[in-house]
């Protein structure tokens, strides 16, 4: 890695020397490869106690010895769960509150890591607590849906657990999604011990945490549909059409939120992947959630889903931001242009769901792309540029069509109108392959060779404690960044975030647009992204005893080579780890993720079959004769 090599500045002095740190310094440093043993034991003990309490509560309900769940379920039926049996109403309330809690913790945690770097352990980061509570709440909601039905089969889609115990399919899937997300916590610690600290949202185990929570919305929608079909209460207790519209719209808006969390690195302005991924992810989320909203909720459903998304997602940004909690403010993709595209397409294609999904996807990837392009100029730290125009639109169309087809099949499945297996399975598989191909394309990058940056600093504040400076940067060769996707100075993990564009003066010469931090724990670098090329030039790095690295100073003038951004932004990653081991571990996570996605697809198909009318029983020949007599 670059932080363990020797670099020579323009003055000929060694600027970076890797050395074994003193043990005392190592003890004072934040751990860089997994949590301390005492924190693991405390966290594991707490999780075991909570799980035991949940199991006791479920056992007590199933045996009739504890009536708490029965009372809570009855209360939910009279409240927000009107028109749903208790086994769907109570989990719906618990899961909704849990998801909002986990979302708040997630954006808070990301903000803390961007502004303060790695933490001292899972229990030392306050943002981990709402994440853990929220994810355990999702798992709890699924378990409640499974244990609450007693002496009944909760709908034709129910899954048999024992001889006389049936659980709703949505509850089983909800518990599975919650367990999958919770499993990401211990696996994340193991991952850090093996590979080091990967400070990126797209680390495999990080994707488990956010993916399980985000995809749990599909399980919640299945559970709601099962509950509404199984409701046998008085007609007076049925929710009004407006109430059902709002409840479904909230589910669709929640799905939009869940699918949008994968964009968080772009929301904060520190993505470690190519910019074309952002329009792909936005279009994928919009296609899936908004097409499902329009077909399942009704006219205006896509717009309602976006309004709910803005209320919750925007509210979380405000809560985490400087005005309330005091951390970083995350940008929010707008989605209104995409919602209008879906609503307009539905005027002609509402009765042809798959066609609506495909056409909406194309519109989302073109007109919706244009809307987000304009919005990015005002809202994103890294606005979109002409460098991604062609490829970004192609990626957006691919994501929009794939998401639109999945959203159409989700809505049709929830209404019992899923196309025949040959069609639905082919469309589902093609969508997954299309998304995988687009993501793989976005991951193909290269690091430009023989590119150097000559830097001249002009001090703004000169003390060691608060040193900042402007810079004049001369790239060699001059066309090393020709119309780039971004050319910025990024400073992070110094108790703040600094992302400022470089101003081109022509001929490969750039200057800073704001003073950059060069002191304390700041990690400051030049970032260049042009086409498939992504490179960085470190300007200032603090000492990090935990990984055996001394400080990289920023003298008044120096010359440094461009190198892989990954080696700078993820300097805690361990070297010497076999590539096959990383591939094997990533493959395990991928297999678990595919299992969750396929399970949700199975759930949609199962509930769709359960909603179709049963074929009439065949009559005996004698019966037909008497009927015709």
Image (cartoon, rainbow, N blue to C red):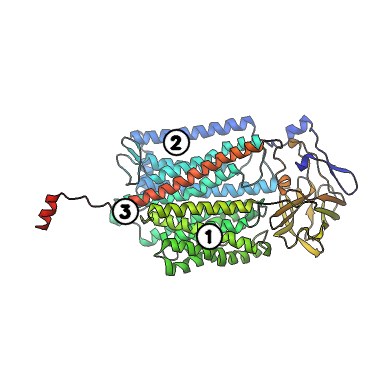
Give the x, y percent position of residue 504: 78, 63
Question: Which tag, 2 or 3, sits closer to the chain's start?
Answer: 2
Nearest to viewer (mark 1 / mark 2): 1
Q: Is residue 586 above or below residue 245?
A: above
Disc number placed over residue 612 in the picture, else none: 3
Which residue is label 2 attached to?
54
Q: Is residue 350 above or below residue 138?
A: below
Q: Residue at x 49, y 40 (%)?
A: 179
Q: Residue at x 58, y 64 (%)?
A: 369
Outermost residue, left direction?
Answer: 629
Question: Which tag, 1 or 2, sits closer to the chain's start?
Answer: 2
Question: Which tag, 1 or 3, sits closer to the chain's start?
Answer: 1
Image quarter for residue 8?
A: top right
Q: Secondary structure at mark 3?
A: loop
Outermost residue, right direction?
Answer: 11
Which residue is label 1 attached to?
400
Give the x, y percent position of residue 439: 59, 52
Check contact, mark 2 vs mark 3: CB within 8 A. Answer: no
Left or right: residue 134 versus residue 148 is right
Q: Secondary structure at mark 2?
A: helix
Which is more toward the observer, 378 or 419? 419
Q: Would you call the spot at circle 1 few (<14 residues within 10 Å), some (14-19), or many (20 or more)?
A: many
Q: Residue at x 12, y 56 (%)?
A: 627
Distance from disc 2 to disc 3, alpha carbons, whole Å, reads: 35 Å
- Visible in this render: residue 454? yes
Q: Quadrant of the N terminus?
A: top right
Q: Quadrant of the C terminus?
A: bottom left
Q: Would you call the spot at circle 3 few (<14 residues within 10 Å), some (14-19), or many (20 or more)?
A: few
Q: Would you call the spot at circle 2 few (<14 residues within 10 Å), some (14-19), or many (20 or more)?
A: some
Check contact, mark 1 vs mark 3: CB within 8 A. Answer: no
């Amino acid at each position: 890695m670059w932080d363990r090599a020797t670099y020579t500045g323009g003055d000929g002095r060694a600027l970076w020397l890797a050395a074994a740190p003193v043990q005392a310094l190592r003890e004072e440093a934040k751990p860089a490869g997994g949590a301390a043993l005492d924190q693991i034991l405390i966290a594991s003990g707490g999780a075991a106690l909570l799980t035991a309490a949940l199991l006791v509560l479920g056992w007590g309900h199933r045996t009739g010895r504890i009536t708490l769940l029965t009372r809570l379920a009855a209360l939910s039926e009279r409240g927000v769960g009107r028109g749903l049996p208790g086994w769907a109403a109570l989990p719906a309330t618990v899961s909704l509150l849990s998801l909002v809690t986990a979302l708040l913790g997630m954006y808070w945690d990301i903000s803390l890591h961007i502004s303060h770097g790695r933490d001292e352990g899972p229990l030392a980061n306050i943002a981990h607590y709402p994440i853990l509570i929220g994810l355990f709440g999702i798992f709890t909601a699924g378990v409640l849906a499974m244990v609450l039905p007693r002496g009944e089969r909760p709908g034709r889609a129910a899954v048999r657990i024992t001889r006389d115990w049936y659980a709703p399919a949505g509850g089983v899937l909800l518990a599975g999604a919650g367990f999958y997300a919770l499993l990401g916590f211990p696996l994340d610690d193991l991952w850090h011990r093996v590979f080091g600290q990967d400070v990126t949202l797209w680390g495999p185990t990080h994707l488990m945490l956010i993916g399980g929570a985000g995809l749990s919305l599909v399980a919640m929608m299945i559970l709601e549909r099962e509950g509404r079909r199984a409701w046998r209460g008085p007609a007076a207790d049925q929710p009004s059409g407006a109430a059902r519209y709002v409840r479904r719209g909230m589910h669709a808006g929640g799905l939009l939120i869940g699918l949008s969390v994968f964009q968080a690195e772009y929301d904060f302005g520190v993505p470690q992947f190519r910019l074309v991924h952002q329009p792909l992810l936005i279009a994928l989320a919009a296609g899936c959630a908004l097409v499902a909203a329009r077909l399942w909720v009704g006219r205006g459903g896509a717009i309602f889903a976006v309004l709910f998304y803005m209320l919750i997602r925007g509210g979380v940004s405000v809560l985490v931001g400087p005005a309330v909690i005091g951390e970083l403010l995350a940008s929010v993709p707008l989605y209104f242009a995409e919602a209008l595209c879906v609503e307009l397409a539905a005027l002609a294609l509402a009765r042809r769901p798959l066609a609506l999904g495909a056409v909406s996807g194309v519109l989302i990837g073109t007109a919706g792309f244009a809307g987000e392009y304009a919005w990015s100029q005002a809202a994103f730290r890294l606005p979109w540029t002409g460098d991604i125009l062609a490829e970004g639109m192609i990626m957006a169309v691919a994501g929009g069509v794939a998401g639109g087809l999945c959203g159409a099949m989700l809505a049709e499945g929830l209404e019992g109108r899923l196309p025949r297996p040959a069609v639905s399975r082919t469309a589902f598989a093609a969508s997954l392959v299309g998304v995988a191909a687009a993501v793989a394309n976005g991951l193909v990058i290269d690091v430009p060779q023989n590119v150097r940056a000559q830097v001249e600093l002009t001090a703004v504040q000169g003390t060691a404690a608060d040193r900042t400076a402007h810079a004049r940067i001369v790239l060699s060769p001059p066309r090393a960044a020709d119309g780039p996707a971004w050319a910025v100075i990024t400073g992070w993990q110094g108790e703040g975030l600094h992302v400022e564009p470089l101003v081109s003066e022509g001929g490969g010469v750039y200057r800073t647009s704001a003073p950059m931090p060069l002191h304390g724990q700041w990690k400051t670098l030049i970032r260049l992204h042009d086409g498939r090329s992504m490179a960085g030039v470190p300007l200032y790095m603090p000492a990090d005893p935990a990984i055996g690295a001394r400080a990289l100073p920023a003298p008044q003038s120096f010359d440094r080579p461009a190198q892989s951004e990954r080696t700078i932004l993820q300097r805690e990653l361990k070297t010497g780890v076999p590539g096959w081991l990383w591939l094997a571990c990533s493959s395990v996570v991928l297999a678990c993720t595919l299992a969750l996605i396929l399970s949700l697809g199975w759930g949609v198909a199962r509930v769709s079959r359960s909603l179709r009318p049963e074929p009439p029983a065949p009559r005996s020949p004698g019966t037909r004769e008497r009927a015709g007599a």
